[in-house]
Image (spheres, helix red, strand yellow):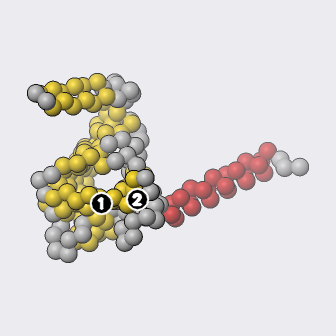
């Protein structure tokens, strides 16, 4: 017969093993020159904001308190973020260099290039950013919109369908 204490010990060991295995499968980044969070602040109430001008419309809607994180990141030539995800959208503006984003859609590897002066929204699901330049530093400013208290980034395992993407 297994005692409650022994069962708790087994469950704890299983929990640690699961946490360690998911960390071991994560794909860490490399070549980060700068990673500065300028500010993290919480909007304590749900948000419902609409912007409209001519044919353009924007909507920001949340259902509970939300954290906003403003961040500056620089990747060295050949640097990469590793596969990761976010629990909400991340608006990314490219100040210098070219950001190459990889993500998997319907089992296929998709590549998107964003030059200096462009902006895009990182998907909520797994993706990776790379600086594929051999000479230029990639610099980007990010605005994360995530549930209050949520982690800014969740490391993800390599999905295995984007050869050469770290």
Task: Say which of 66 and 121 sits in front.
Answer: 121
The answer to whether residue 126 of the structure is visible from this angle is no
Task: Say which of 162 and 107 sits in front.
Answer: 107
Task: Say which of 113 and 33 sits in front.
Answer: 113
Q: Residue furthest right?
A: 1
Identified at 19% across, 30% down, the residue is: 57
Find disc 1 in the rendering and name its residue: 111
Residue 45 point in image, percent of width and height: 34, 24
Residue 76 point in image, percent of width and height: 23, 69
- The nearer-to-camera label among 1 and 2 is 2
Note whether 81 is above or below 154 in the view shown. below
Residue 157 point in image, percent of width and height: 47, 60
Q: Residue furthest bottom?
A: 134
Identified at 13% across, 30% down, the residue is: 55
Disc 1 to disc 2: CB gap under 8 Å:
no
Crowding at label 2, few (<14), some or many (≥20) Cα neighbours within 10 Å?
A: few
Q: Which quadrant is home to the C terminus?
A: bottom left
Residue 141 point in image, percent of width and height: 20, 51
Residue 100, quarter of the rendered image: bottom left
| Label 2: element kind | strand
Note whether 63 is above or below 100 in the view shown. above
Find disc 2 in the rendering and name its residue: 108
Residue 44, quarter of the rendered image: top left
Crowding at label 1, few (<14), some or many (≥20) Cα neighbours within 10 Å?
A: some
Note whether 94 is above or below 77 in the view shown. above
Task: Say which of 43 and 131 sits in front.
Answer: 131
């Amino acid at each position: 017969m297994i005692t409650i204490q022994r069962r708790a010990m087994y469950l704890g060991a299983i929990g640690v093993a699961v946490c360690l295995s998911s960390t071991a499968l994560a794909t860490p980044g490399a070549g980060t020159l700068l990673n500065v969070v300028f500010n993290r602040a919480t909007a304590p109430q749900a948000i419902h904001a609409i912007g409209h001008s001519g044919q353009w419309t924007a909507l920001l809607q949340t259902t509970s308190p939300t954290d906003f994180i403003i961040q500056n990141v620089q990747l060295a030539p050949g640097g990469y973020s590793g596969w990761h995800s976010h629990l909400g959208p991340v608006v990314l503006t490219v100040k210098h260099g070219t950001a190459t984003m990889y993500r998997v859609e319907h089992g296929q590897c998709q590549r998107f290039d964003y030059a200096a002066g462009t902006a895009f929204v990182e998907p909520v699901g797994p993706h990776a950013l790379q600086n594929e330049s051999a000479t230029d530093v990639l610099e980007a400013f990010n605005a994360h919109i995530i549930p209050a208290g949520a982690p800014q980034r969740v490391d993800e395992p390599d999905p295995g369908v984007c050869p050469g993407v770290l």
